[in-house]
Each structure stands twice: as C-alpha cells, then as structure tokens.
C-alpha cells in the first residue's frame, strides 16, 4: 500500500459523492416497500427476505402488488411479474461485469448488487477506478439502507391494521408510477406505457389477478421487436438506467 | 404454493437473472434489440402495475379514492418532488378522501 494509493483522486471522490446522493434517496423508500409488503399479506420475515435476497425494487414491488390483489393463488403470476421486471438486471450485469474484474466471490456479490442505481452511478464515472468506487459505494449504501428501511416499514405496517384507511393501496400505485416516470423520456416508451395500461385495464375484469400485467408485457415485446416509434438514437439513450435519486 | 414458496422462488429467479449477466460474453450487451426489449418490458410492466394497483378490486375494476391520489402523485413526480414525499402525499390524499366519504 503506497501513499499514492491512499490518496483519493477527484474522480473517486466525485463517484463516492454521487453514491451517497443516490443511495440515501433510494434507501429511504424501503419504508414504503416494507409497509406495502406487510399490507399485501406477507409477514415481517418474508418481507425482509425479499429485500435481502431479491434486492431489486421494481421486482419486489411487483411481487407484493400482485399478491395484494390476488393472494397466494396468484403466486405464479406474481413470480412471473417479478422475474420479467428483473430481466433488465441481466443487461446491467453485462455492462457492470467488465469493471468488477476477476474473483468468484467478488463477482457473486457484485451480481447480487447489480440494480438500476449501481449501474447508473458506476457507468456514469469517467475512469475504471471511479467506476468501481461508484458501484461498490452505491451498492453497500443501498443494500444496508434498503434492508434497514424495509424492516422499519414492515414493523410500522404490522401495527397499522386496515391499510386502505391510511391510503397505503394508493401509495403502492404511486410507487409504481414513480418507478415508471423517469423511463418516459422518449416516444417509444410512452407508446408502450399507454398500450400496456390499456391492455391491463381491459383485461382486469375478465382475467385472474396478475395475468393482465403479464399480458400487457406483450405490448413491449411487439414494439421492441418491430422497433416502431423508435429511432437509432433512442436505442442508445434508452439503455441508460435512470437513478431514482437523481430526482 | 405458500407465500414462502412464492417469496423464495421469485427471489432466487431474480438473483439468477443478475448472475447470468456476469456469466455470458459481454458482446451481448451491444445487441440493441435485447437492450430495447428489456427497457420496454420494464416500462410495460410498471405501467400495467400502476393501472392494476389504481383500479384493481375484488370485483375487477373500480374507481375510488386511489385515482385522485395517483393523479396528485403524477403532478408531484412531474415537479420532481422526491419519491418518498410523493408516496406519502398519495397515501394522505386517499386517506383524507376516505375519511370524509
């Protein structure tokens, strides 16, 4: 360990600063996840296992959202929704993997922490060292923060009882809207969002809970494969995940 | 399937998807169709979940206090209000409407 290694470059300092900005903002809404999960019928342990093991906000909200309306009998659809929402993490991992370097345990942990925010912060940094710093700092802040606030939210939710009285069901809808909002910067995603909303609304009265959500995913498949309403420029721009904490 | 089965199966599947990205060749990330599909899939699912969570009920489709709450949330997101504050505001709107109706 030399003196030059101990001194932090301005790049790394900047990376750590954005890690804290994004990480703390995101960790805060673990409270809403914890409360909503308990409201959906999960116990405190199940809620915490989701944040510890699944650790992907969109997928976690989707799973408890479907369970809230359909119960355990909608389990298949709940799992499918969570998994489909988790597919984007595979693509993030492709981009993050080269900056992590070798070592099985390190790559396993990095894989577990590959989410919207770690990808966004790390890929935004100019040098390999600052990319690494951005990834690991954002990862550790969100992992610790998200799990602590999930537990807190679950304990609060446990005390609340009738949740609709407190508007928690409306809060869940607002949470999905908040995850969706930063992704609506181009025409193509807006078209897909509107199409998926219509499909879900039409199918809701006739199909079991959770299935309309999966059917709405077909809108993305059709638009994505044909690339209607898309441009080449948007392909590149859309690939950038948007850190929630940026807002 | 119990809730525990659902929680564990979904968690392992989502975790596996992340690890898959570390195992396949990096060249796959360059495929625009794959990237576009993953991004649009996320948009479609989140949008459908907004609708289901706003209008869903045991009777299928229902308009109630959740709709004005989500409308308020949309305005606040457009004004770049932080996530957690918007969530609280949405809950307050729905809770207030229910308290007086």
Image: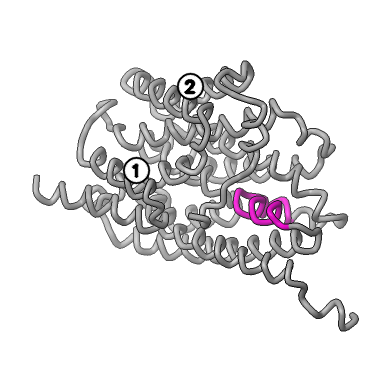
In depth, the one of A9 and A180 nearer the eye is A9
Instruction: Count up the numbered dots.
Output: 2
- Circles 1 and 2 on the same chain: no
Residue at left offset 40%, top offset 27%: A197
Q: To which residue does mark 1 refer?
A: B74
Question: Where A225 falls versus A84 (above or below)?
Answer: above
Give me the disc on residue A187: none
Q: What residue occupies the far right of the structure in this picture? A: A2
Q: Would you say the residues marked 1 and 2 are in contact, meaning their CB atoms lie under 8 Å apart?
A: no
Queried whether the magenta region covers residue B47, the answer comes back as no
Location of residue B15 in the rendering, given as x and y in whole percent from the top left corner: 66, 46
Q: CA distance from mark 1 to mark 2?
A: 24 Å
Q: Which residues are magenta?
A: A109-125
Q: Main secondary structure of the magenta part?
A: helix
**Image-quadrant location for residue A209:** top left
The subunit carrying tag 2 is A
- Which is nearer the eye, B2 or A92? A92
Depth check: A50 or A26 in front?
A26
**Residue at x-position 15% and y-position 47%:** B98
**Residue A23 at x, y percent in the picture:** 56, 62
Does residue A114 belong to the magenta stretch? yes
Q: Quadrant of the N terminus of chain A?
A: bottom right
């Amino acid at each position: 360990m030399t003196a030059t290694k101990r001194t932090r470059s301005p790049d790394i300092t900047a990376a750590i600063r954005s890690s804290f900005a994004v990480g703390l903002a995101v960790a805060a809404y673990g409270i809403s996840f914890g409360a909503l999960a308990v409201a959906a019928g999960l116990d405190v342990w199940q809620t915490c296992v989701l944040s510890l093991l699944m650790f992907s906000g969109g997928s976690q909200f989707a799973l408890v959202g479907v369970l809230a309306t359909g119960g355990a009998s909608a389990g298949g659809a709940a799992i499918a929704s969570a998994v489909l929402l988790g597919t984007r993490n595979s693509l993030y991992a492709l981009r993050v993997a080269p900056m992590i370097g070798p070592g099985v345990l390190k790559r396993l942990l990095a894989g577990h922490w590959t989410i919207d925010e770690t990808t966004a912060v790390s890929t935004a940094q100019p040098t390999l060292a600052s990319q690494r710093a951005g990834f690991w700092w954002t990862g550790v802040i969100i992992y610790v923060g998200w799990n602590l606030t999930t537990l807190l939210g679950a304990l609060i939710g446990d005390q609340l009882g009738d949740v609709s009285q407190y508007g928690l069901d409306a809060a869940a809808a607002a949470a999905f809207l908040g995850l969706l909002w930063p992704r609506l910067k181009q025409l193509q995603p807006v078209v897909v969002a509107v199409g998926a909303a219509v499909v879900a609304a039409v199918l809701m009265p006739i199909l079991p809970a959770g299935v309309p959500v999966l059917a709405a995913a077909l809108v993305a498949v059709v638009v994505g494969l044909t690339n209607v309403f898309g441009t080449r420029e948007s392909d590149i721009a859309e690939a950038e995940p948007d850190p929630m904490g940026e807002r | 399937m119990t809730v525990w089965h659902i929680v564990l199966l979904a968690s392992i599947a989502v975790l596996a998807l992340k690890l898959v990205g570390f195992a396949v060749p990096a060249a796959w990330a360059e495929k625009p169709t794959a990237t576009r599909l993953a991004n649009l899939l996320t948009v479609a699912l989140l949008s459908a979940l907004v609708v289901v969570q706003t209008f869903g009920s045991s009777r299928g489709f229902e308009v109630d206090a959740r709709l004005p709450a989500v409308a308020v949330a949309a305005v606040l997101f457009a004004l770049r209000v932080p996530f957690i504050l918007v969530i609280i505001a949405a809950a307050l709107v729905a809770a207030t409407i229910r308290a007086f109706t």
